């Protein structure tokens, strides 16, 4: 199967992106539910304040998994510039979010900025993948 078989490629990428999303959601759920326990076991009670940011970083992982799947699909579809420009465009967003959220919320704010940035990248990559017509990047 290759990009020259658009129907099969689109179905395969849908399966891959969905599976990555499911893994990301599972990681996010486990991380949110057990963040204090994870920090306690791995680093000890001394680092218990890291449980809050870990919840948000676990949530960001759901977007991260999907982001990587979309990036691979865009690379295979020959949309190389999108794979470079989307994350580069997200950098100023991440910096701005950190400038606003870090002073107000500390390390939790920085983790929220990461989650929101990953969400923005997924939205942008999805927009490139599906385009205005609703077709994918190769259709």
Image (tube, helix red, strand yellow):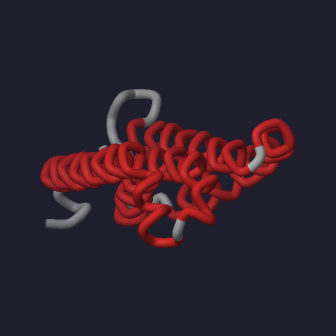
**Left or right: 121 with respect to 6?**
right
Residue furthest bottom in the image: 42
Foreground residue, 88 or 50?
A: 50
- Quadrant for the N terminus, please: bottom left
Q: How many marks?
A: 0
Foreground residue, 109 or 13?
A: 109
Residue at image location 47% in from the left, 63% down from the top: 40
Query: Do we see residue 74 in this rendering?
Result: no
Q: Position of residue 7 (x, y in %)?
A: 16, 48
- Quadrant for the C terminus, please: top left
In the image, residue 9 above or below residue 130: below
Residue at image location 46% in from the left, 45% down from the top: 59
Query: Do we see residue 106 in this rendering?
Result: yes
Residue at image location 38% in from the left, 47% down from the top: 28
Foreground residue, 19 or 82?
A: 19
Q: Position of residue 60 (x, y in %)?
A: 50, 48
Residue furthest top in the image: 133
Foreground residue, 113 or 137?
A: 113
Q: Position of residue 41 (x, y in %)?
A: 42, 68
Residue furthest front in the image: 45
In the image, residue 101 above or below residue 37: above
**Left or right: 8 with respect to 119?**
left
Residue at image location 78% in from the left, 47% down from the top: 98
Q: Position of residue 89 (x, y in %)?
A: 70, 50
In the image, residue 48 above or below residue 32: below
To which quarter of the image does residue 103 belong? top right
């Amino acid at each position: 199967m290759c990009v020259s078989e658009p129907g099969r490629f689109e179905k395969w990428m849908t399966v891959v992106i969905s599976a990555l999303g499911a893994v990301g959601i599972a990681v996010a759920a486990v991380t949110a539910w057990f963040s204090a326990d994870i920090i306690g076991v791995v680093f000890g009670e001394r680092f218990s304040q890291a449980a809050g940011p870990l919840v948000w970083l676990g949530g960001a992982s759901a977007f991260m998994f999907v982001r990587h799947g979309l990036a691979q699909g865009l690379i295979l579809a020959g949309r190389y510039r999108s794979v470079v420009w989307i994350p580069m465009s997200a950098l100023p967003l991440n910096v701005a979010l950190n400038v606003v959220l870090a002073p107000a919320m500390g390390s939790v704010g920085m983790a929220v900025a990461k989650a929101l940035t990953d969400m923005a990248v997924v939205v942008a990559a999805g927009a490139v993948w599906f385009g205005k017509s609703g077709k994918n990047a190769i259709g």
